[in-house]
Image (spheres, rainbow, N blue to C red):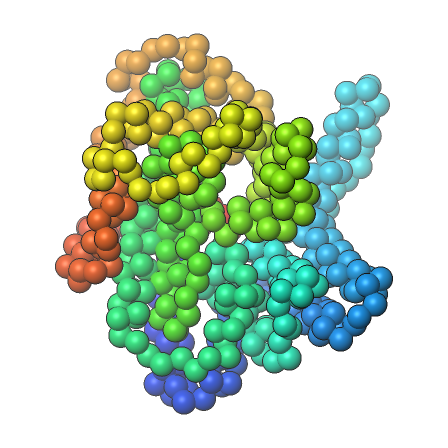
Amino acid sequence: MFFNSIAFLLFLPTVFFLYWFLLKRNLKVQNILLLVASYFFYGWWDYRFLILIALSTGIDYVVGLKLQSETVKKKRNYLLALSLIFNLGMLGFFKYYNFFVESWIDAWAMSGVKMHVSTMQIVLPVGISFYTFQTLSYTIDVYRKKLTPTKNFINFATFVAFFPQLVAGPIERATNLLPQFSVKRIFNLERAKSGIHLIIWGLFKKIVIADSCATYVNAIFDNYQEVNTLTLLMGAVYFAFQIYGDFSGYSDIAIGTARLFGFELMQNFNYPYFSRDVAEFWRRWHISLSTWFRDYLYIPLGGSRTTKNKQIRNVFIIFLVSGFWHGANWTFIIWGALHALFFIPLLIGKKNRKNINQVSENGVIPSFREFMDMLITFTLVTLAWVFFRADNSTVACHYIKRLVSNLNFNIEYLSIERYSIEILVLIGIFILFEWFHKHVEHPFLGRVKWLKIVGVIIMILTLGVYSNHLEFIYFQF
């Protein structure tokens, strides 16, 4: 079920009404309702894959309890291995089986050996990368004795399948979300209003910004061999805002929806395109994933508390794994490698935490140096996005080659299908709004008038784009 669908428009108020008006005095029944609603929400897409969530839930619930009672280190290691093998094995099979088989065939083909091995047409379950990482973090934290496992199966199952963030995050930690299922929730009007504001703003990002950009991104990338530098540049910029509007929009809707039911999810985006270097970008982009890799991969590898060579190794590992997490395509691995290359000079120069302070030097108006730093960082990130968007690495390389070689900035070349300057204006207004939102305390959430303004904008602008019903990009991950 998509957040930008009529089905969800009917689903959400129905669950909300049952939750607060019929079951408000019974915490256990409320949690059961959320569990049933979450399975219904996911099953709406394909009910067959509910068995995967159920199996992952059951195994990690039992493993958590066994880890609590087991004191022999070797047996504890076996229990952790069981969770890792099942969850990562399930993820690997559904997401990477065809990739490895096809890569194996291609490798032999380069040696002149032709192999004819058929790959299975495996359907990737929506959100599998998200809920497997969420339940894995629970098991690992219990193994490390940072978390006491829950004995309440309903609470744990609801934590794993919680519908607002089930299919595209944020990837919640059990230490934050799981305890909230054990606390009686009382309806809070202000929290609900802030949730509605976030939902509307998230829909605006998705429907108005992302989906509008998608039309031109698709046209430009499909015709990249026929257009000039300016058009290719705009295609890359449009995609940068498409993926940001799409993914951060989903996160806003997820966080807002959770607030309607009395839950608080972690922030997943913090104005990443205002970052002054790539290190800061990754402290602001997909925060739930970057911190997951930091805590469960980077730090166990030694993190930054080791030799410089090992630090560089760890950075490459973390970014390559992050790229591979995003999809079974060499383009994602190259995308991760590029970010590692962007990050390494900061690490060597000990400047990776230079911009840890999120406050601008001059307040609302950035200094010239800050502006140039943000522009350079955005350029590097946008360049890497070309690999993320391209169908394969060959297309991405050709796209970038034409971008820097076909130096024709004739405005006429922008007329692919139907070019609209309104998109650029809209992006410009969006950037200004986010900048002032970042530097002025709660201008959007604190004023009901913004709800009306954004609501009107959505109703007007979505008349032409809402009918597309485009999926959220991160559903494929």
- The image shows residue 212, relative to residue 190, as above or below, that is above
Residue 125 picture quarter: bottom right
In the rendered image, residue 80, in percent from the top left (x then y), is placed at 75, 61
* Residue placed furthest toward the left: 449
Residue 228 picture quarter: top left
Residue under the point 47% across and 40% down: 282
Q: Nearer the viewer, residue 429 or 268?
A: 268
Q: Nearer the viewer, residue 346 or 182?
A: 346
Residue under the point 43% across and 82% down: 184
Q: From where the camera sits, is residue 82 visible?
A: no
Using residue 91 as the reference point, say whether residue 112 is left or right of it.
Answer: right
Using residue 69 as the reference point, say whether residue 25 is left or right of it.
Answer: left
Residue 23 picture quarter: bottom left
In the rendered image, residue 147, in percent from the top left (x then y), is placed at 62, 68
- The image shows residue 438, relative to residue 185, as above or below, that is above
Residue under the point 34% across and 30% down: 374
